[in-house]
Image (cartoon, rainbow, N blue to C red):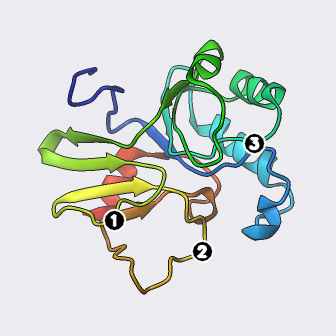
Amino acid sequence: MLTAENPYAITPDTWIISDTHFYHENIGRYCNRPDNWQELIIKNWNDRVAPGDIVLHLGDFALGKKTHFELLTGILNGKLFLIQGNHDRLSQTYCETNGVTLIKNSFQVILEQQTKLIFSHRPIIPLEDGWINLHGHIHNVPPPPEGTNLGPNHINMSVEVREYRPWKLKDIINHLC
């Protein structure tokens, strides 16, 4: 349901993914991705996500040419909502022209049973008690222990630590309980 408290109609059936970095030539080496990582993500995405499903991407969707973005939005299933990551540089108008809702900032949602969620690209630090932060940005590189307080309520959704696929929000939440 679309409300002021849930502006993007996030439900337990929403798919969550982060840091796909499509068309980023060096990310495979930086993050030790398998040789076919891009095809693997696309296959895993389309094997799970139906055309009418909501997908919340937590940032760093794709790099490179606009034609790459257009190609991807044409072949990936689902209605895409994209939190702008540090590598997402396309305008809101351009994204919307290609069926993607660009979200400029992190946002909060309170689901049934008072599950309080914050969706962001970078981890939210400090994180208020009682909130769960689903984020990306850190890939498969653990943050340095000094100065960071990433605890059990920080959920890294970067593809490298999530089997190169989107996950249903309810499966992530159920895993926490």
Q: How packed is label 3: few (under 14 Cα within 10 Å), some, or many (20 or more)?
A: some
Q: Amino acid at mark 1?
A: Ile
Q: Amino acid at mark 2?
A: Val
Taking the spot 47% from the left edge, 39% from the top edge, the residue there is 15
Q: What secondary structure is found at the residue carrying circle 3? A: loop
Q: What secondary structure is found at the residue carrying circle 2? A: loop
Q: Which of marks 2 and 1 precedes in the sequence?
A: 1
Label 1 to label 2: alpha-carbon separation? 17 Å
Q: Which of marks 1 and 3 precedes in the sequence?
A: 3
* Image location of residue 74, percent across then percent down: 73, 21
Q: How packed is label 2: few (under 14 Cα within 10 Å), some, or many (20 or more)?
A: few
Q: What secondary structure is found at the residue carrying circle 1? A: loop
Q: Amino acid at mark 3?
A: Leu
In the rendered view, would you say 127 is above or below 9?
below
* Image location of residue 84, percent across then percent down: 53, 39
In the rendered view, would you say 145 is above or below 67?
below
In the rendered view, would you say 32 is above or below 56?
below
Q: Nearer the viewer, mark 1 or mark 2?
A: 1
| Residue wearing tag 1 | 125
Taking the spot 70% from the left edge, 49% from the top edge, the residue there is 21
| Residue wearing tag 3 | 63
Where, by quadrant of the figure, is residue 64 drawn?
top right
Taking the spot 86% from the left edge, 61% from the top edge, the residue there is 35
- On the picture, is 92 further left or further right than 73? left
Label 3 to label 1: alpha-carbon separation? 27 Å
| Residue wearing tag 2 | 141
Where, by quadrant of the figure, is residue 155 drawn?
bottom left
Taking the spot 51% from the left edge, 56% from the top edge, the residue there is 136
Can you tell which mark lies on residue 15? none
Q: Nearer the viewer, mark 2 or mark 3?
A: 3
Which quadrant, please, contains the C terminus?
bottom left
